[in-house]
Image: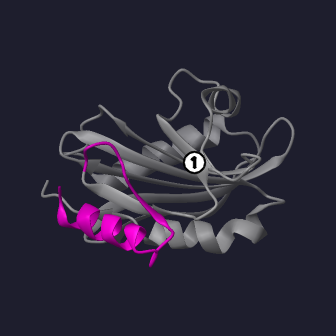
Amino acid sequence: MNLLRIISLALLLFGVARAEVIEVGDTGVTFVAPDEFKPLSQELRERKFPSSNGPGFVIGNEWATTTIAYDVKPQDLSGADMEELRAVFEQTFNLMIPGIKWKANRVSEHGGQSWIYLEMTSNAIDTDIYNIVMVTGIGKRMVIFNFNSTKEDFPKYEDVLRKSLDSIRVTTDQ
């Protein structure tokens, strides 16, 4: 058991911390989940993310109007130029996401790791959406996060989403 898990377990057992540290697959990437967020049921995940390429893991608020989706995909980004890859994501999102409005679109360092950071609003069938997407390569795989909220809920959840985003750590050597 790694040191982070031991410390997290000890804090939880002694009631010092309530927030849950979640590891993204076996990548060594971890983040702290907001206290009230719980895993979405399979049915709710499929309704919210109907694509067969939807995320492997989703946690969210009681109504799933604000969620954090995360996954490990088999794409090898180890030799990729992150700026070129960011441009591909931007072009793809511009073509596929209705009403996209960019808030931020960059490559940035986070915890000693290079990440693509995409922040945007868009239109969905029944409501407007606020998304923050982060992508990086770990070994020969891609780790992706999607911090997602209705525009109506975003002001209420923005602080906890950004704290969770800021808590992302990479604890393995690549």
Residue at the outermost front position: 14
Q: Position of residue 61 (x, y in %)?
A: 69, 53
> Residue 127, how many percent across, how many down?
85, 45
The location of residue 88, given as percent across then percent down, is: 44, 43
Direction from residue 139 to residue 99 in the image, left or right: right
Q: Which residues are magenta?
A: 1-27
Which residue is identified by label 1?
Answer: 59
Report the side of 170 relative to 21 (left or right): left
* Residue 137 left/right relative to 21: left
Q: Residue at the spot x=61%, y=70% of the render? A: 160
Query: Is 44 drawn above or below residue 10 in the view shown?
Result: above
Does residue 54 appear left or right of residue 136 in this picture?
right
Which residue is pictured at 64% across the width and 34% down the height?
A: 96
> What residue is rendered at 68% in x and 32% in y?
44
Residue situated furthest right in the rendering:
126
The quarter of the rendered structure image containing the N terminus is bottom left
Whether residue 25 appears in magenta in the rendering, the answer is yes
- The crowding category of the residue bearing disc 1, from other C-alpha atoms within 10 Å (few below 14, some 14 to 19, many at least 20), is many
Image quarter of residue 125 = top right
Mark 1 lies on a secondary structure that is: strand
Instruction: Give yes or no for residue 122 being in the magenta stretch.
Output: no
Query: Which image quadrant is residue 42 in?
Result: top right
Q: Residue at x 32, y 42 (%)?
A: 25
What is the three-letter code of the residue carrying label 1?
Answer: Ile
Which color mode does the image show? one colour
* Image coordinates for residue 57, horizontal then vertical, percent: 49, 39
